Image (cartoon, rainbow, N blue to C red):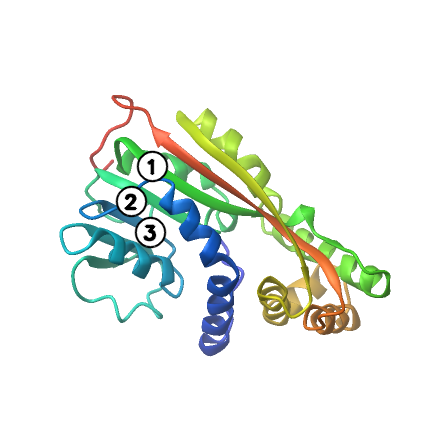
Amino acid sequence: MDPYIFKANAADHELYRLRLVEEALDESTTALLKKTGVSAGWTCLEVGPGAGSILRWLGQKVGRDGAAVAVDKKLTYLSEFVSLPYRVIEGDIRDVSLEGGFDLIHARYVLIHNQNSIDIIHRLRSLLKPGGYLVLEEPDFEASEWVDEYHSVPGNRVNAAMCAMFTNLGLDPGYGKRLPLALSQSGFKLEMTDAATHLAPGSSPVARLMAESAVALRSKYIATGKAEDADIDTYVNAARNPASWAIYYSTVAVIARAAAGENPSSDS
């Protein structure tokens, strides 16, 4: 079983953290999705919708003549999506029963949490219609670096602990930078690849997101032996301080297409 690192996070704190993900990333995500031309009547699949902001946006784009389908292992924060064009399914994307033929499939920060991410990529490919779009966004935490000297030593200890946590769980902390190659090797045609470095001051959305992640994952970071309580306290306080600057990580975004005639459009 893939060990989702935030599984033990309290529901209210996890919702707060997911809202920070939305605040930090939704603008860039919707700009990315617009490049596909998504519009009324499209059938879209959102994998791992979290608190649902991108699912909501997709539903508004496709309208009642389209479909905005979501698959997640936990539907705690998706209770509002009960009418057309929405359909919410609980389960693992690798196992749930779905008819293929999607015009667009999107996932953000999903593959990094799965040891067998290539299986998910293959499943998504089977669910796309010929010529359909796959839009993926994945982080590269190996790009993290604390910039200001005052917080650099404890900050970089926490960065090392974060990466070690992923590695110890059989996951790849630098997954984002390896995503384009994985898609190419899986038969996708890459339309666009972009890497955004999250160089930001404390108190910015991405900094607050990483502060709350550190709060939720404190024990996991300490268990790596790479950071101590005091390091995490300094990291969290610095991430909330606008005078402090860090590269928190980078996000790699890819728009890929399923080549016409090469992938099945039915469930596998």
Query: Reading the chain from its start, which is encountered first: label 2 or label 3?
Result: 2
Residue mark closest to the camera, 2 vs 1? 2
Of all residues shown, which one is farthest toward the top?
261
Spatial CA distance of label 2 from label 1 is 10 Å
Q: Residue at x 33, y 51 (%)?
A: 46
Residue identified by numbered label 3: 46
Q: Residue at x 65, y 69 (%)?
A: 219
Label 1 CA crowd tier, 10 Å (few <14, some 14–19, many 20+): many
Image location (x, y in percent) of residue 167: 64, 48
Identity, as a three-letter code, of the amino acid under mark 1: Tyr
Identity, as a three-letter code, of the amino acid under mark 2: Val
Q: Which sits in the foreground, 230 or 242?
A: 242
Q: Is residue 236 above or below residue 84?
A: below
Query: Reading the chain from its start, which is encountered first: label 1 or label 3?
Result: 3
Residue identified by numbered label 1: 133
Query: Reading the chain from its start, which is encountered first: label 2 or label 1?
Result: 2
Residue mark closest to the camera, 2 vs 3? 2
Q: How many marks?
A: 3
| Helix, strand or loop under label 2 | loop
Residue identified by numbered label 2: 38
